[in-house]
Amino acid sequence: MNVMDILMYGNRTLLGTLEDLSDAGRKVGGVCGVWSVKDIMAHLASYEHLLAEALNTFSNNGIGPNMADMAELGDAWNDLQVERRTDMTVAEVMAEYNEVHEQVMARAAKIPAETYRQNGKIPWYGPEYCLDDFVVYASYGHKREHSAQISVYRDRLKI
């Protein structure tokens, strides 16, 4: 598996679903539960922070604050992250997401390919998993899931 390609294609798919969607269209709730597209992007920005922190653990930087908070708060962490970005504009949320995604890409490129395939390197995710798994499930698959929700929302706008 080529992690850099997986990260690039997940991002490309997500950003493609946002093309030509107005700021007003990004603020309408009900796209994913009560969340708007802006809220989904706030949620995904928080997951980019998680991925950046996960990749940082391979530079001996330990578990970051987002990973610690998620472990402590569980499902409540998602809503808290979206709530923290409520007063941000759509542009600010997108800028945060894009900035952290660039950090993810830079950090991911520094990790040797064989490290991604080694089980047990991310014990906080599960000893049977490898970093490849985390990237596919927590990043790529997650972005594809929300991209599909945004696409359905966009289809409803056309009706």
Image: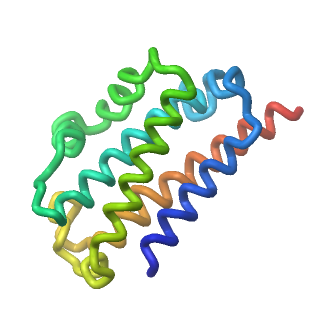
Quadrant of image for the C terminus:
top right
Which quadrant would residue 70 be assigned to in this image? top left
- The image shows residue 11 at horizontal and vertical percentages of 55, 55
Name the one closer to the observer, 151 or 112.
Answer: 112
Name the one closer to the observer, 150 or 126.
Answer: 150
Which quadrant would residue 23 be assigned to in this image? top right
The chosen color scheme is rainbow
- The image shows residue 107 at horizontal and vertical percentages of 31, 62
User: Residue lying farthest right?
Assistant: 159
Whether 80 is drawn above or below 73: the answer is above
Which residue corresponds to the image point at 50% horizontal and 59% vertical from the top-left? 141
Whether 30 is drawn above or below 3: the answer is above
Which quadrant would residue 137 be assigned to in this image? bottom left
Count of numbered marks: 0
Whether 141 is drawn above or below 75: the answer is below
Which residue corresponds to the image point at 62% horizontal and 32% vertical from the top-left? 31
Name the one closer to the observer, 94 or 141.
Answer: 94
- The image shows residue 26 at horizontal and vertical percentages of 65, 28
Left or right placement of residue 143 versus residue 85 in this view:
right
Left or right placement of residue 127 versus residue 24 in this view:
left
Which residue corresponds to the image point at 39% horizontal and 56% vertical from the top-left? 138
Left or right placement of residue 142 versus residue 71 in this view:
right
- The image shows residue 98 at horizontal and vertical percentages of 49, 44
User: Residue lying farthest top?
Assistant: 87
Quadrant of image for the N terminus:
bottom left
Which residue corresponds to the image point at 32% horizontal and 81% vertical from the top-left? 113
